[in-house]
Amino acid sequence: MRIRSQIILTMVSAAALIGLVGGVAIFTQIAATKYLGLTEATNVAQELADTIVFKSSDGTPSLFERPEALKQFMQHQHRRMHRDFLVLDRNKIVVAHAADEEHHIGDKFDHDPGNEIGQTLDDGVPRRFVDPEEVNAILAVPIEYPADTIIGAVLLEYDPVLHAAEQRTNSLLWLVGLSAAAAVLVAVGFAWMLLSRFGAGLNDMIRGMEALAKGNAMTRISHARKDEFGQLADGFNTMADQLASARAHVEDIVETAAEGIAVLDGDGRIASANPAAATMIGRRADKIVGQQWDAVLTVCDPRGGAFAVGASPVEMALATGRQHQGEVRLTRSDGSHLPVIASCSPLSRSDGGLVLTLNDISELRRAEGVVNERADQLAILNRELHEKSETTTRLVKLGELLQACVTFPEAFSVVGTAMTEFLGGLSGTVHLTSASRNLVEEMAYWGDVRSSVTQFAPEDCWALRRGQEHVAGPGMLTPRCAHITENGKKGYVCMPLAAQGETLGILHLCEPNAADKPQWLAERQQILRGVVDTLALALANLRLRETLRQQSIRDPNTGLFNRRYLEETSSRELRRMERSAQPLTILMLDVDHFKQFNDTFGHEAGDLVLKQVAATLIEHARDSDVVSRYGGEEFAIVMPGCSIEEGAERAEALRQSIRQLHLTHRGRTLGTVTVSFGVAAYPEHGAGWAEITNAADHALYDAKGEGRDRVVVAKTSTPSERPTIQLVAAAKASADVKG
C-alpha cells in the first residue's frame, strides 16, 4: 500500500478513534456524574451521621441522645443544603426529620420495598432505594457509635444531589463533544505529521517504561532527538537513575537492618526477606522466598502455647488489612525459641500484602528475668528480715517477762508457755543444776513427747560435759546422752544455759520426726540460739537477785533471817492476825555469858555457839514461825497463831534443848550453854509491833536480872498478875542452880 493510502487510512482511523474517544468520554462522564452524585450524597449523609453521634471532650451528650437539639440541627441542615433528611434509630423509628411532611417523629419508616434500611442497619453498607409513594431515590447511611456498632441510619433524598451534579456536568459534556469533533478535524490534518514524528520517540518511551515496569532498573532510552521526545527521554533516564539509586539505598538499609524484615504478598507467601530475618528464622534467605509464611515461620504465644486459628498477628493482619503488633515466640529450625515483637503493616497496593518486622527482645527478656530474680531475692530477704524482726521482738518480750519474774517457778511458768510459740512442734524441757552441782533437775516442760528423765547427774549429759551444743538423732554418729529415755528414733539437742561465766543447766529439745526432717534443727538454729541466750541470762540474773535477796534478809553466820526482815515480816503477820482475830507471840532470847565464850575460847567458838543455838531454834520452829538473829547473841522468834501460854511452853522447851547441847571446839569442851527468854504476845502486851517487842525485850531483861537461864513472860497491865508458867520456870531455874 502506498504511503498516501497509509496516511489517509491513518487519518480516518485517527478521526474515528477520536470520535469514539469523545463518545466514550461523554458516556463515562455521565456515569461518573451519577457515581460522583452518589458519592457526594453518601459523604454528606456520612458526615451528618458522624456529627449526630459526636461527643465533645467536656462530656456533652451527642445529638442522637438529645432529640430537641437533633431536631434543630436537622432543620438547620435543611435550610443550608435545601435537602430533606430523616434520622432513624435501630428499629427504623423516625427520630428526627427536616422538611418532610410525610413522616413524623415516632413513626416507623417502611417505605423501603426491599428492606434496604434493615440490611444497612445489619451490615453497615450504604444502600439506595426508591420510595414508591414519593417516587424519589433515597440513600440510607448507617450511624455508628462506637465504631463498628450501628445504632441507626440517616436517610438522604438522592435525586436533588444527582440533578445538581448533572447540571454541573452538562456544559462539560458539550465541551467534550465539541472538543471531540474538533479533534477529529485536527486529527485529519495532523495525523500524518504526528504519526511520523511521534512514532519513533513514542516507541522508545514505551519500550523503556515496559522494561522499567518489569523491574529492570538499568533500562535507559538512547536517542539523538532535540525535540520534546528527546527531553522526555532525558527525564526518563534521570528518573530511572534516581529510582535505581533510591532502590539501592533502601535495599542497603533493609539488608543491614538489625530487625528482621520480610515482605508477604496478598496470598501469604514471602516475597523477600533480609539477612536478619533469615538469621532469626534459622534458614537461608533463598530457602524462604516463595514459601508460605506459616511453612517457614512457627510462632507461639509469649508463653510458648499455640495461637488459636486466625489469632496470630500475621493472620490477623492478612485477614483484616490492618496493622497488628504483638509479642510472639519464634520457633527456629533448630528447635530453639526466640522472643520477638512481630509488627505487621499492610501494604497499600491493590494486590494486598504486608511487611513483617521482627524485633529480637531476648536480651530484654533476659534482663527482665535477672530483675525478677533479684526482686524474688529481695522479697526473700525482706521476708527473712521481717521474720528476724518478729523473732527479735518476741525474744525481747520474753526477756522482759523473764526479767520481771521474781521467783524461779514464776520464770519457768513463762518459759513453758513461750517455748510453744518459739519452737512450735518441738517438745522440750529446761533443767537446772542444783546448788551442790551434783544434780540436774527438770524445772519446765512443754510438748507431747518427754524424752529425758527429770533428774540426772551432770556427767550424764554430753552438753554439760563439753560445754557446748550436743545433737543426736537418726543417721548421726554422735553418742546419745545417758539421760535420754527413748530408743534413738527421735532427734534431740541439748544446749548449755551459760551466762556470767557459769553453766546453769541445759535446754533440751526433741523432734519426734527427725528422720523425715533432717533440717529440723538448722531451720531453727538462729531463734534457738537467741532463746538460749535470753533464757540463760534471765536465769542468771534471777539467781543473782535471789542470792542478793537472801543476803539482804539473812544473817551470814547463822543462816537465820536478820532483824530487818523480821520487822517487815512481823508487822505484816501482826496485821494478818488482827484481821483474823488470832493471837501472836514473840520470843526474845539471849545467850547467857556469851562474852565469856569469846574471851575464853575465841570468836570461832563463839560463832559455833551461835550456829548451834540457831540450828536448835530452826529444828523446833514451825513452818509459819519466823526465826531471826536480832543482833549480837540475841535472837527473836515470831509465832503467828500462838497464844502467850503456848509461847511460854515452847520457850521453856527451847531453853531445855539448848541447855542439853554439848559443844566442843578444837578438842576443847565449851561447857553448858544457857539462854534467857522474854515472852510477849498480841493482844495482851499491845497492838503494835514496837509495843510487843518492847515488852518482850523488858521481859528478857527481867530474866537476865533474875539470874538468867529462865523464861519470863512480859508483865501485863496488872503487875500482880504473872502467868504461872513464869513462876514454874523460875522454880526450875532455882533447882538447876542448886543442882
Image: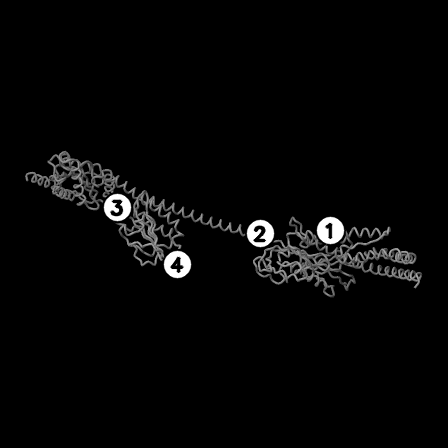
Q: Read off the residue under disc 1.
A: 246
Q: CA distance from mark 2 to mark 3?
A: 70 Å
- Which mark is first along the chain, 2 or 4? 2
Amino acid, disc 2 = Glu
Rendered image: mark on residue 516: 4
Q: CA distance from mark 4 to mark 1?
A: 75 Å
Where is the N terminus found, in terms of image quarters? bottom right
- Which mark is first along the chain, 1 or 4? 1
Check contact, mark 4 vs mark 2: CB within 8 A: no
In x, y percent, where is residue 450? 31, 56
Q: CA distance from mark 4 to mark 2?
A: 43 Å
Q: Residues within 10 Å of mark 1 (few under 14, many from 20)?
A: few
Q: Quadrant of residue 738?
A: top left
**SS class, disc 3:** loop
Please give left or right for residue 68 compared with residue 170 in the image: left
Q: Read off the residue under disc 3.
A: 435
**SS class, disc 2:** helix
Mark 4 or 2: the one toward you? 2
Q: CA distance from mark 3 to mark 4?
A: 40 Å
Residue 581 visible in this rendered orientation of the protein: yes
Amino acid, disc 1 = Ala
In x, y percent, where is residue 239? 78, 51
Q: Read off the residue under disc 2.
A: 363
- Which mark is first along the chain, 1 or 2? 1
Check contact, mark 3 vs mark 1: CB within 8 A: no
Q: Quadrant of residue 271?
A: bottom right
- Which mark is first along the chain, 4 or 3? 3
In x, y percent, where is residue 686? 20, 38
**SS class, disc 4:** loop
In x, y percent, where is residue 612? 16, 41
Amino acid, disc 3 = Ala
